[in-house]
Image: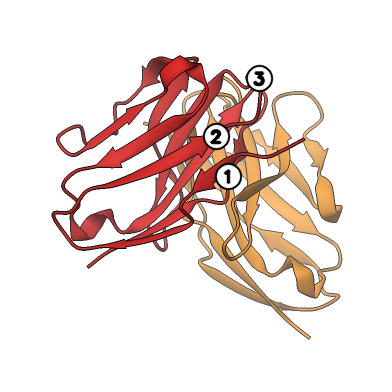
């Protein structure tokens, strides 16, 4: 069965510092890959997605992610974090596109220090 | 464009009681999903509808959970009877195609 691992439960960074959130997946083929953000009391918002092609994908709010097939990873990055980025971030995979069953990681809680 | 609507936003019930959640997807979206998000975990798919037909309900605890999507638009998710371990946020999402799911704000259920 496919699985998603987010090894960091909590991460704290200073405002203006760079950020990298890790995501590894386990699946026989390359799945479709997603990063979602969830603010308190809110639903999940899609940051970016990878289906195929260029392995560096750009998303909203200045986020980007890089797909590395050899490492089965899809890490999320941001060059300079803003206080408003404090939230929980979820990596997810799907077999045949985002319109089908998503399997989520356990999430990484990001805290931003001013 | 209006987003996915869910109600109620919060619900507190005692164990063995029943509860129902309602979801109104984005207009025109054929696919609708219910996810359960337990505190500290990622969302887990409970059931997926395509129009008013069930595509995947393999992780729905059918002895106590039920869901329907009459007329292929709104959907309700019911729990009867509730257990303490059902305390979670229940997320509804909808999708127009295979590209992306749009999530509602969720219903936070507390079972005491």
Q: Colour of chain A?
A: orange
**SS of the residue at dot 1?**
loop
The residue at which mark 3 appears reads as B28
Callout 1: 10 Å neighbours few (<14), some, many (20+)? many
Q: Nearer the viewer, residue A104 or B86?
A: B86
Please state the horizontal and vertical placement of residue A84, each as a whole percent of the image.
77, 70
Q: Is residue A26 visible?
A: no
Residue occupying the point 61% across, 43% down: A73
Callout 2: 10 Å neighbours few (<14), some, many (20+)? many
Residue occupying the point 52% across, 45% down: B6
Q: CA distance from mark 1 to mark 2?
A: 9 Å
Locate the N terminus of chain A by quadrant. Answer: top left
The residue at which mark 1 appears reads as B104
Judged left or right of residue B6, residue A48 is right
Q: CA distance from mark 2 to mark 3?
A: 11 Å
Q: CA distance from mark 1 to mark 3?
A: 15 Å
Chain label for disc 1: B
Callout 3: 10 Å neighbours few (<14), some, many (20+)? few
| Disc assigned to residue A91 | none
Q: Quadrant of residue B46?
A: top left
Q: Nearer the viewer, residue B85 or A93?
A: B85
Compare marks 1 and 2 and give the one earlier in the sequence. 2
């Amino acid at each position: 069965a496919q699985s998603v691992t987010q090894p960091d439960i909590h991460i704290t960074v200073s405002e203006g510092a760079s950020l990298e959130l890790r995501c590894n997946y386990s699946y026989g083929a390359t799945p479709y890959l997603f990063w979602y953000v969830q603010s308190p009391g809110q639903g999940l918002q899609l940051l970016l997605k990878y289906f195929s092609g260029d392995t560096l994908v750009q998303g909203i709010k200045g986020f980007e992610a890089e797909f590395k097939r050899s490492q089965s990873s899809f890490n999320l990055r941001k060059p300079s974090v803003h206080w408003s980025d404090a939230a929980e971030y979820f990596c997810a995979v799907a077999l045949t596109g985002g319109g089908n069953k998503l399997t989520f990681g356990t999430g990484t809680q990001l805290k931003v220090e001013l | 464009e209006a987003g996915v609507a869910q109600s109620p936003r919060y619900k507190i019930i005692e164990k063995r009681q029943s509860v129902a959640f309602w979801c109104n997807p984005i207009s025109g979206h054929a696919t609708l999903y219910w996810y359960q998000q337990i505190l500290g975990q990622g969302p887990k798919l409970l059931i997926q509808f395509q129009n008013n037909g069930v595509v995947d309900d393999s992780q729905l605890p059918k002895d106590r959970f039920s869901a329907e999507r009459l007329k292929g638009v709104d959907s309700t998710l019911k729990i009867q009877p509730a257990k303490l371990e059902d305390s979670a946020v229940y997320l509804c999402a909808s999708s127009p195609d295979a590209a992306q799911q749009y999530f509602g704000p969720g219903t936070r259920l507390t079972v005491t």
